[in-house]
Image: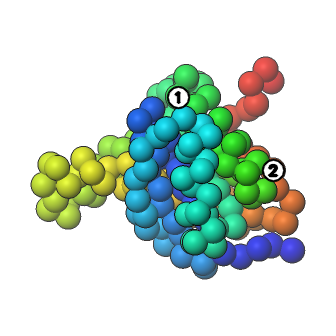
């Protein structure tokens, strides 16, 4: 039986993690906040209260693939954070191609008329919202966040070593 409810998206960077959440019906993604990274354990400790407060039922982690679709070092970092948070919460995690999400987020923030400083403050959470909205619009969320947790990789990405 599916657990219907909000999803949390993470745009994992080396210094920050941008967060966005969907509404419970999974129609709309909204930027939430940006947290400063403090190492894997510290990141999870910061994220746990957010997961509880937002009543999150599934995680979507952006994968910063290279333009040719290959894995990058940043992909490993994003997967580490996703796997650690999934383990700590027992929530399912999906990984979603995030190529061009920051470019799209910057464009959206510019269209809102935000100054350079505000755009810089909000870019990571806006990118997380772009990633999550793309995930929701792709239809991948329809069968996601089932009772049994597990990682879901995009069809175009295989597990390392396969």
Q: Position of residue 162 (x, y in %)?
A: 80, 24
Residue placed most toward the observer, 156 or 111: 111
- In the picture of the structure, the residue carrying the numbered disc 1 is 74
Q: Say above or below: 83 vs 109.
A: above
- Against 20, residue 86 (above or below) is above
Q: How many marks?
A: 2
Q: Is residue 92 left or right of residue 72?
A: right
Say whether disc 1 or disc 2 marks the residue closer to the N-terminus.
1
Q: Which residue is mark 2?
A: 150
> Tell me, what colour scheme is on the image?
rainbow
Crowd tier of the residue under label 1, counting other residues whose Cα lies within 10 Å: few below 14, some 14–19, many 20 or above = some
- The residue that appears at 60% across and 37% down in the rendered structure is 40
| Residue 102 shows up from this direction | yes
Secondary structure category for the residue under label 1: helix
Q: Is residue 27 visible to the viewer in this orientation of the structure?
A: no
Determine whether 5 is above or below 75 in the image. Answer: below
Q: Tell me where residue 3 appears, x and y as whole percent.
A: 77, 73
Q: Disc 1 and disc 2: Cα gap in Å? A: 21 Å
At 63% from the left and 68% from the top, the residue drawn is: 52
**Along the line of sight, the residue nearer the viewer: 63 or 83:** 83
Element on which disc 2 rests: loop
Residue lying furthest bottom in this view? 25
* Viewer-proximal residue among 25 and 34: 34
Q: Quadrant of the N terminus?
A: bottom right
């Amino acid at each position: 039986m599916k657990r219907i409810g909000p999803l949390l998206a993470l745009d994992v960077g080396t210094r920050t993690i941008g967060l966005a959440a969907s509404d419970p019906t999974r129609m709309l993604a909204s930027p939430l906040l940006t947290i400063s990274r403090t190492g894997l354990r510290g990141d999870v400790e910061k994220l746990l209260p957010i997961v509880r407060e937002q009543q999150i039922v599934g995680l979507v982690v952006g994968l910063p693939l290279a333009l040719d679709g290959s894995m990058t070092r940043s992909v490993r970092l994003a997967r580490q954070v996703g796997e650690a948070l999934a383990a700590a919460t027992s929530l399912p995690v999906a990984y979603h191609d995030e190529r061009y999400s920051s470019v799209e987020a910057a464009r959206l923030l510019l269209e809102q008329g935000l100054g350079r400083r505000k755009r810089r403050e909000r870019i990571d959470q806006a990118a997380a919202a772009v990633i999550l909205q793309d995930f929701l619009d792709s239809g991948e969320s329809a069968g996601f966040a089932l009772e049994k947790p597990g990682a879901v990789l995009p069809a175009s990405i295989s597990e390392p070593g396969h």
